[in-house]
Image: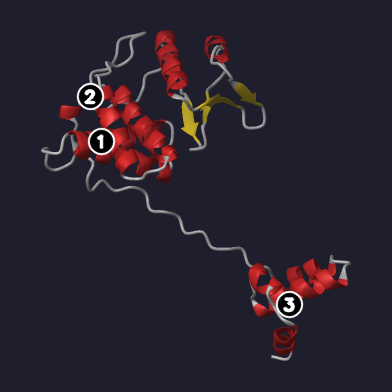
Amino acid sequence: MQLSIQGDNQGHLFVKTPYHPGVVKLLRSIPGRQWDPTNEHWIISDSQSNLDDLLKKLYQTGLFTLPESEEAAPPTQGEAPKVHDIKPGLAALRRELQLGGYSRRTIDVYESQVRRFFHRTGCPPIQVTREKIVLYLESLADSIGLSRSGAVHCVSALRHFFRINYPHNYPNPADSIPVPKQNRKYPDILSKEEVFELLGALSNIKHRFLLSLAYSGGLRVSEVVRLKAGQTHMLLNS
């Protein structure tokens, strides 16, 4: 059975799976879960406690396994990967990022990414290599999907974690790991017909004049509201 878990980086996890009464019962036990009939997936709060609870219960069903590196030993049925004590390292990470002026949101995201990496791989920090991080990212991309922002957050979080806690390890295992390039989004440009249709929909002459002035002059709203009568005359005659 295949399960998809994706985050939106806004505090939500989307869980999609084929129907199975045991899995449905499991998901309904997660506090605050919601079913989205339009997209046919479950929505749960993206908290560490919810994620840990969900992963533990998924393992107990014996229907799923989590993505791991090739060198990690597969868990037995009903048993999650061994999680090594990284609390001191996470505390050091949080402290250094706070001193560095990072926002609370960024610090929380980085800490969550580090927790998930070690939870899912079960690899001791001292044994983490660049190749293991790359395999982890590839396994996430293949199993649950991995957005560019998610990859960037994961790599950045691990880079900070190892720089702060293992400064004598060279090179840093999270250095020089490629992440997906950002897709360039070009703005939608209205056609001449669409512009006339938009202006013609305005019944208020003043509003139509202001919008026509802003469009024809390529002005921002802040520039339009600061225009003087003399400047308006010059624009209309240019």
Residue 73 place in picture, x, y as percent: 23, 18
> Where is mark 2, residue-wise?
123
Q: Is residue 85 left or right of residue 13?
A: left
Mark 2 or 3, which is nearer the eye? Answer: 3
> Where is mark 1, residue-wise?
161
Which callout, 3 or 1, points at the residue further toward the start of the chain? 1
Residue 139 place in picture, x, y as percent: 34, 32
Measuring 30% from the left and 10% from the top, which residue is drawn there? 76
Determine the secondary structure under disc 3.
Answer: helix
How far apart are the alpha carbons under marks 2 and 1? 14 Å
Which callout, 2 or 3, points at the residue further toward the start of the chain? 2
Q: Amino acid at mark 1?
A: Phe
Between residue 192 and residue 218, name the one nearer to us: 218
User: What crowding class fits label 3: few (fewer than 14 Cα within 10 Å), some (14-19), or many (20 or more)?
Assistant: some
Vertically, is 8 above or below 236?
Answer: above
Vertically, is 142 above or below 238?
Answer: above
